[in-house]
Amino acid sequence: MAELNARLYVGNLPYVAQKSDIENFFSQNNVAIKKIDISVDPFTGRNPSYCFVDFHSEVEAAQAMENLQGREIRGRPVRINLKTERSSFKERLPTKVWDRDWTRREVPSRDVDEKAHAFDRWNRDDAQAHWSAPENEKRRIWVGGLPRIPNQDSLNAEMRELFQGYNVQAVSKLISPHASKESVPGSHYFCFVDMLNALETQEAIGALNGKENPYGAKYIVRLSQRRSPNQTTIVEREQLNHTSRIFVGQLPHYDDQASLENDIRQLLSDFEIGSITKLFTPSAAKMEEGGDQHFCFVDLMSPQDAQNAIDRLDKQPTPSGGAYKIRMARPPPPSAGSGARREQVGGSGGRFEQRKPQGPPRDFGGSWRRAE
């Protein structure tokens, strides 16, 4: 058995758990801690499902590992083990990239000290406040025209090289293109880069958009903007909203409300349910995907219950062999235009729909929208 020290690994965390959740966990169990080392992705607000905790002595660490094993943080039982050292420097294998004609080649990966990352998620305490501020302040840049780069360190190094001379605050992970881009020639992966201020952001966009990249293509550099000013991200729904309503998707068709409610109450048997909406029919595009695509909304007793239900049940198997999709429900958008009016319609949960003169809307139940 490895020698015990005063630093322990705490794993099986919900991805949305924050540093404050870890602090409350030990405080509520009357365990004094010295330091929490948790990585929070500034672009998703999520942790890698584990953290490291320093105690004041080896004895206190041993007691915590024995007494708190399996206790819950945000509804999930934690695993506490001896801390495993992380190497700060690794020699990287070559990075595989795909050219425009979909041929694969290898380019040398940059050997990068992890401490030199553009955004040190392990040591900075402001990651949790970083999710939406850069976009709201117009200092988040969308960088496209990238090939598949499976190595995060190489992406970080490339972005630092591209933005040399600018104050880069953070670099996101590489993001895969939409399925509709798969048949389109070219490189369609992308990432986000956060700058120090809006002025520098505009200067960087003007200077770098269209610049040739090492892969025989050109970088696409533009300001990151939401498709809609009212659009919310999964992170905001998980972390910043105070709703207790959840979206439950990947449901089969039910012939009656009683059958739907029976299955939903079994699924959420550990939670007190306020109301269950009717079953909603998916769009034609969703129907073409096949499988169970119906959905409903469920009101629980508190935002914490809603988050716990998501942590426990999202992606759990359905009886038909699929996987449940459980998300925070999106709040209703503001009424659009003077001709728009909101009317309450019958049914459980006090649902509303928004009616506009140009035609009937899609009914998503209480104007709460389906999570993407």
Image: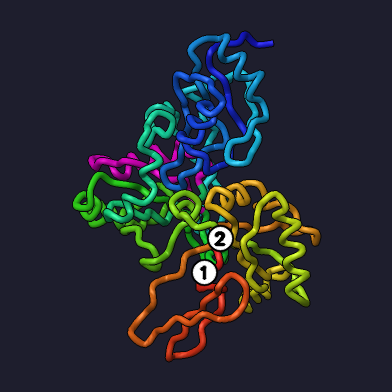
Q: Magenta includes 170?
A: yes
Q: What residue type is labelled 1?
A: Trp
Residue name at image x 73 percent, y 56 percent? 267
Q: Which quadrant of the view contains residue 226?
A: bottom left
Q: How many labels does the image show?
A: 2
Along the horizontal axis of the image, is 236 left or right of 293? Answer: left
Residue at 53% x, 13% y is: 6
Q: Position of residue 223 (x, y in %)?
A: 31, 58
Q: Is residue 368 above or below residue 340?
A: above
Quick check: is 144 in the magenta stretch?
Answer: no
Viewer-side residue, 220 vs 286: 286
Region of the chain picked out in magenta, as a range: 149-175
Q: Where is residue 158 in the image (x, y as percent from the top left)?
A: 38, 41
Say the numbered circle drawn on residue 108. Answer: none
- Contact (Cβ within 8 Å) of mark 2 with mark 1: yes
Q: Residue at x 76, y 57 (%)?
A: 266
Q: Residues within 10 Å of mark 1 (few under 14, many from 20)?
A: many
Q: Tell me the quadrant of the picture where the C terminus can be found.
A: bottom right
Label 2 to label 1: alpha-carbon separation: 9 Å
Q: How crowded is mark 2: few (under 14 residues within 10 Å), some or many (20 or more)?
A: many
Visible in this render: residue 7? yes
Which amino acid, mark 2? Answer: Arg
Element type where label 1 sits in the image: loop
Work out whether residue 187 can be spotted: no
- Mark number, residue 245: 2
Check disc 1 and report the residue beneath it.
Answer: 368
Closer-to-camera residue (23/230): 23
Q: Nearer the viewer, mark 2 or mark 1?
A: 2
Q: Quadrant of the N terminus?
A: top right
N-terminal of the two: label 2 or label 1? 2
